[in-house]
Image (cartoon, grey):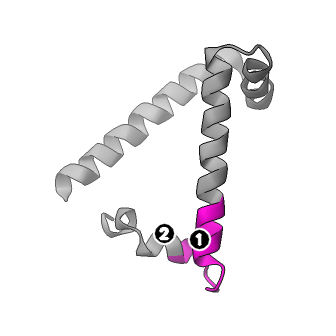
């Protein structure tokens, strides 16, 4: 379990550093870049569209699983294996 925690921390650090570099180079204008890539009908746009669909499906699933419970997303997170790592 300690190795998994270390992996999660390392992934968070790498993602935060990468995000900081991208923001410093391109600014905060995420949506125009995200949807602009889709409008060009190229591979980056295909990835963005696929990613958007996967996020939508996972959000619908989480909403369906937690719809009968009051705490909602917090309950789903607590029940997940990721929460047990911390």
Q: Would you say the residues marked 2 and 1 are in contact, meaning their CB atoms lie under 8 Å apart?
A: yes
Residue 67 or residue 74, whichever sits in front: 67
User: Residue 12's x, y, as percent?
Assistant: 42, 41
Residue 73 picture quarter? bottom right
The residue beneath circle 1 is: 73
Horizontally, is 61 left or right of 33 in the view?
left
Q: Is residue 20 above or below residue 11?
A: above
Is 34 or 45 nearer to us in this picture?
Answer: 45
Where residue 59 sits, quadrant-wise, is: bottom right
Q: Secondary structure at mark 2?
A: helix
Question: Magenta-highlighted stretch: main secondary structure?
Answer: helix
40 or 2, nearer to the observer: 40
Instruction: Tell me the magenta residue range.
Output: 60-75
Res. 28 visible in picture: no
Q: Residue at x 49, y 35 (%)?
A: 16
Residue 36, image quadrant: top right
Alpha carbons under labels 2 and 1: distance apart: 6 Å
Q: Residues within 10 Å of mark 1 (few under 14, many from 20)?
A: some
Is residue 74 among what the camera can see? yes
Badge 2 is on which residue? Answer: 77
Q: Position of residue 32 (x, y in %)?
A: 81, 25
Residue 81: % across, % down: 35, 66
- 80 is higher (above) or lower (below) than 4: below
Q: Is residue 43 left or right of residue 41?
A: left
Residue at 24% over, 52% down: 4
Residue at screen point 78% across, 27% down: 35
Q: Is residue 44 magenta?
A: no
């Amino acid at each position: 379990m300690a190795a998994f925690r270390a992996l999660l921390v390392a992934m968070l650090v790498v993602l935060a550093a990468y995000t900081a570099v991208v923001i410093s180079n391109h600014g905060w204008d995420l949506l125009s870049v995200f949807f602009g890539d889709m409008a060009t009908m190229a591979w980056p746009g295909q990835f963005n569209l696929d990613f958007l669909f996967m996020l939508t499906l996972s959000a619908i699933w989480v909403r369906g699983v937690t719809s009968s419970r009051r705490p909602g997303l917090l309950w789903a997170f607590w029940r997940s294996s990721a929460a047990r790592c911390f």
